[in-house]
Image (spheres, rainbow, N blue to C red):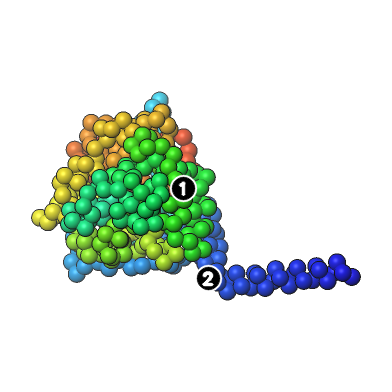
Amino acid sequence: MKNVKRFCVAIAMITVTAAGFWFFFGEKIKILYKSLNSFKDDNLAYTFQHTKEIQPVKKIQKGEHTFEFLKEDQISLPEEFSFQDGVYPVQDFLMDTRTTALLVIKDDVIKYEKYYMGGDEDTLFSSNSMGKSFVSALMGIAVAQGDVKSVDDPIGNYIPEFVGTELETIPIKACLRMASGINFDEDKDMSRFSMRTLMGSSAMKVIAKYGVQEEPYTYRRYLSINTEILGEVITNATGKSLSEYMEEKLWKKLDAGHDAYWTLSNGKELAMGGLSVSLRDYARFARLYLNKGNYNGEQILPETWIRDTMDISAEYSKPGANFDAYNAIGYGYQWWLPEGEEGEFMAIGVYGQWIYVNPVEKVIIVKTSADPNFMAKNYELKHVELFRALAKGV
């Protein structure tokens, strides 16, 4: 009988605890459940086209005017492209990688535009980590306007949670280049980090406890928390949220065609990859970089920032750094740079999101996908050869 009473008391305590937990965290648990369900393979295409209906977001409002690309009759894509010792049919590859949209622009003229899996010109596609390149642009603007004094400044100057920790003296530039040395493993630690911040922990307080694994600029290790740090620097330096700053300093100036949305985590913008943007607006953003920071006569980003962004002369920035397969492509200020002579650069997001720019050919390509096999061997390098074939084919 005594054991039965103890059991009943234990059950009652668990019930009360669960009820209290649900009272304080119920809404966040709902969001977590919905998010996990959204990332099942069969749901990816829908999720990446309806993020603002699934996650809490903040709107980034477009301006009064829209820059319109010219449009010609749809070209025929090349039938195939080569990679290493193989030849791949283009249409088969697009289907195999679960492409949801493809846009090819040359000299401000839309040469090819096609939507799959329910999307269209008005659909907002999730950026995933392509959003990191937008954060880099916002950092460039903040530096140009003097809100951030220099990318050589230590992050502790802007983030009080880092003062007195091992992270205090890490330069902003080291975070831009994914060479901060923070003791964090993208594969093993990200889910735990996301869970803690979703449940209300301050992202910067969580990051402050990771410590340092090696000196800055020693290795390039892709850590999404580096971009979270950049977002916090921008917010603290400017006094504006990332959405507010992007709306004022970038989105309205780009003459975007649609409002954009930024996913919120614990009430703040997810700097590491939370944007939802239309296909042509991704291209409008790429056009800013293609034109060296100038947009229809206004220098939104300094040309020196574009040059520094694309600088991969440091050993850790070059393609193949650390003899690591994850570093097969070079990395600048939150942009990827493949090996080659044409100065190509890319924004890349998980599950197959791409912005590709070829300055020599004056070509911009945007490809969104819902591909659960995005971790396949040579996935990125194979896409580079696809984009090169498309760029030559227009």
Q: Quadrant of residue 178?
A: top left
Q: In which quarter of the image is residue 218?
A: top left
Element carrying mark 2: helix
Q: Is residue 377 above or below residue 283?
A: above
Q: Is 1 on the left or on the right of 86, as rendered?
A: right
> Does residue 78 appear in the picture of this structure?
no
What label sits on residue 229 in the rendered view? none
Amino acid residing under circle 2: Glu
Q: Which of marks 2 and 1 is nearer the N terminus?
A: 2
Q: Which residue lies furthest to the right in this view?
A: 1
Picture coordinates of residue 302 (x, y %)?
Answer: 15, 49
Q: Label 2: which residue?
A: 27
Q: Quadrant of the C terminus?
A: top left
Q: In which quarter of the image is the N terminus?
A: bottom right
Circle 2 or circle 1, nearest the eye:
1
Q: In this view, does 125 lie above or below 83?
A: below
Element carrying mark 1: loop
* Residue at x-position 38% and y-position 35%: 219
Q: Label 1: which residue?
A: 210
* Residue at x-position 21% and y-position 41%: 308
Question: Is disc 2 surrounded by few (<14), some (14 to 19) or many (20+) residues within 10 Å?
Answer: few
How many numbered marks does the figure carry? Answer: 2
Amino acid residing under circle 1: Tyr
Picture coordinates of residue 39 (x, y %)?
Answer: 51, 55
Q: Is residue 231 above or below residue 79?
A: below
> Which one is in front, 362 or 10?
10
